[in-house]
Image: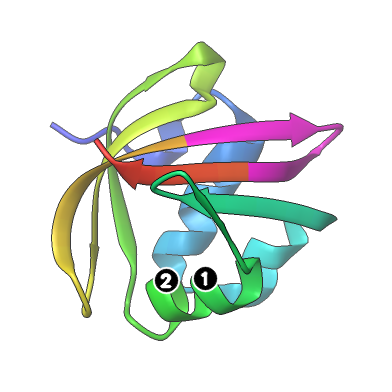
Amino acid sequence: MPISPDHLTDPQVRAFVQALNAGDRGEFFSLLTPDATMSDDGSDRDLAEWTDREIFSSGGHMDVIEESDGGRTLLADYANDTWGGMRTRWTFIVTGDKISRFETGQA
């Protein structure tokens, strides 16, 4: 059974999942450091281009199955209109009160 985003442990990760699921691009990017980076399946990607394609223009949605590492690692069912659904792992590096890096990939 998925964990409600409201119940995720880490406040920055919680806000990230809430913004992603709401399709709120402005809120999403406000949670990231100006120099934030990300990777998908082990390859660094252009953050703005990837998030537009994989999240915002394709109806991305994350259902968190479990969390670990103080809430900074998530196992989630992720779905979008392009790829359908898949089990994914997300890890986050938080610097101060912002996310400076996230890594995702199939789990």
In the image, 71: left or right of 95?
Answer: left
Instruction: Indicate the secondary structure of the residue bearing disc 2.
Output: helix
Q: Which residues are magenta?
A: 91-101
Please state which amino acid type lies under the numbered disc 1: Thr
Vertical comparison of 31 with 66: above or below: below
Q: Residue at x 60, y 75 (%)?
A: 25
Please state which amino acid type lies under the numbered disc 2: Ile
Report the residue marked by disc 2: 55
In the image, 2: left or right of 52?
Answer: left
Q: Is residue 33 among the parts visible in the rendering?
A: no
In the image, 45: left or right of 78?
Answer: right
Task: Work out which quarter of the rendered image holds the C terminus and state it.
Answer: top left
Vertical comparison of 37 with 107: above or below: below
Residue found farthest to the bottom: 57
Q: Is residue 19 magenta?
A: no
Task: Work out which quarter of the rendered image holds the N terminus and state it.
Answer: top left
Q: Residue at x 45, y 38 (%)?
A: 6
Whether the residues at callouts 1 and 2 have beta carbons within 8 Å, the answer is yes
Report the residue marked by disc 1: 51
Q: Residue at x 42, y 71 (%)?
A: 55
Q: Residues within 10 Å of mark 2 (few under 14, many from 20)?
A: many
Instruction: Indicate the secondary structure of the residue bearing disc 1.
Output: helix
Coordinates of residue 37 in the picture (x, y in percent): 69, 53
Q: Is residue 89 among the parts visible in the rendering?
A: yes
Q: Residue at x 39, y 47 (%)?
A: 41
Vertical comparison of 22 with 98: above or below: below
Q: Residues within 10 Å of mark 1 (few under 14, many from 20)?
A: some
Vertical comparison of 83 with 101: above or below: below
Q: Nearer the viewer, residue 93 or 71?
A: 93
Which quadrant of the view contains residue 102? top right
